[in-house]
Image (cartoon, grey):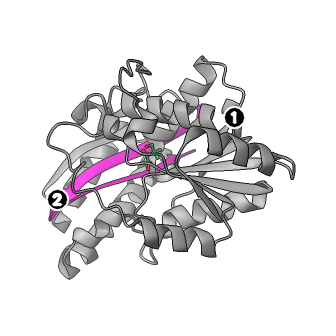
Amino acid sequence: MQTVNQIDPLRKAVTALRQDGKIALVPTMGALHEGHMTLVREAKKRAAHVVVSIFVNPRQFGAGEDLDAYPRPMERDQAMLQAEGVSLLWAPDPRTMYPAGYATNIAVSGVSDGLCGASRPGHFDGVATVVCKLFHQVLPDLALFGEKDWQQLSVIRRMARDLDLTRPYAADIIGVPTVREADGLAMSSRNAYLTAEERAAAATLPRAMQAAIARLVAGSTAASALASLQAELREAGFASVDYAELCDADSLASLAKLGDEPARLLVAARIGKARLIDNMAAAK
Ligand code: PAF
């Protein structure tokens, strides 16, 4: 596996890899875990070469968020990617990504505004901006993102459609289903913040979401199904629920009940020191 930190060697390396067939990009901020490795394995099935980017993107961190404390275990990450058969690691530094005088921002309105966007103003602008740059730098045939961050995936797909991107086309932005622990809890580096007791209680989140979906499918309104979900979470020991919403799966517009269009249930809730997010398809 080759590691490059500058744009010119990146372009040369990508041009050479392209001789063998399709290139898949897996964008990350490093501190890799099983969720990232699942994306890499899925990418390998779909392309001749996998390029992984590691860039801790300052533009998606708000004031008071943990940009400086964000883990950067580069040697460990490199070893994991090498072992998984990744062809190229693109690891620019902030000055390469955002040279002096950098002034362009991509804001994807609507889909960025609610849910996590409401409590993290500017976050999804930062994500859209860096992902658009990564797409132009690597020019991948396809790119893979975890469905765990459904709102992020929706923002990126919207941006690709709106800007008529061709490498990758919006249709080649692949969402990979959330990897779950045996008890259903979505895998996340944040689960490590939980005590044993909180970790056991956290499994209520996916169970309560499934129960809410069953109620929606049976004809409940979103208001009623989500009130029960919130009550179940509080009873299990969650301190608060930041949001629990039934949304159109594509636009993320809030829905009052299940209809014929694909819908998604999205929740963010706090337990102990962790803020857990999860989402599931809600279908009749
Ligand atoms: O999901 C992430 O790790 C980041 O938001 C991404 C997509 C790599 C952009 O910085």
Q: Secondary structure at mark 2?
A: helix
Left/right placement of residue 171 relative to residue 29 reads right
Tell me if I can see residue 271 in this picture.
yes
- Residue at x-position 72% and y-position 43%: 12
Q: Amino acid at mark 2?
A: Arg
x and y percent of residue 142 in the render? 70, 43
Range of the magenta residues? 257-284
Read off the residue under disc 1. 168
| Mark 1 residue element | loop
What secondary structure characterizes most of the magenta part? strand
Q: Residues within 10 Å of mark 1 (few under 14, many from 20)?
A: many
- The quadrant of the picture occupied by the N terminus is bottom right
Tell me the distance, in whole angstroms, between the alpha carbons under discs 2 and 1: 42 Å
Specify the label residue 93 is tagged with.
Answer: none
Q: Quadrant of residue 202?
A: bottom left
190 relative to 261 in the view: left or right? left
Work out whether residue 213 or residue 179 is closer to the camera in this orientation and state it. Answer: 179
Q: Position of residue 85 (x, y in %)?
A: 68, 69
Q: Which residue is mark 2?
A: 234
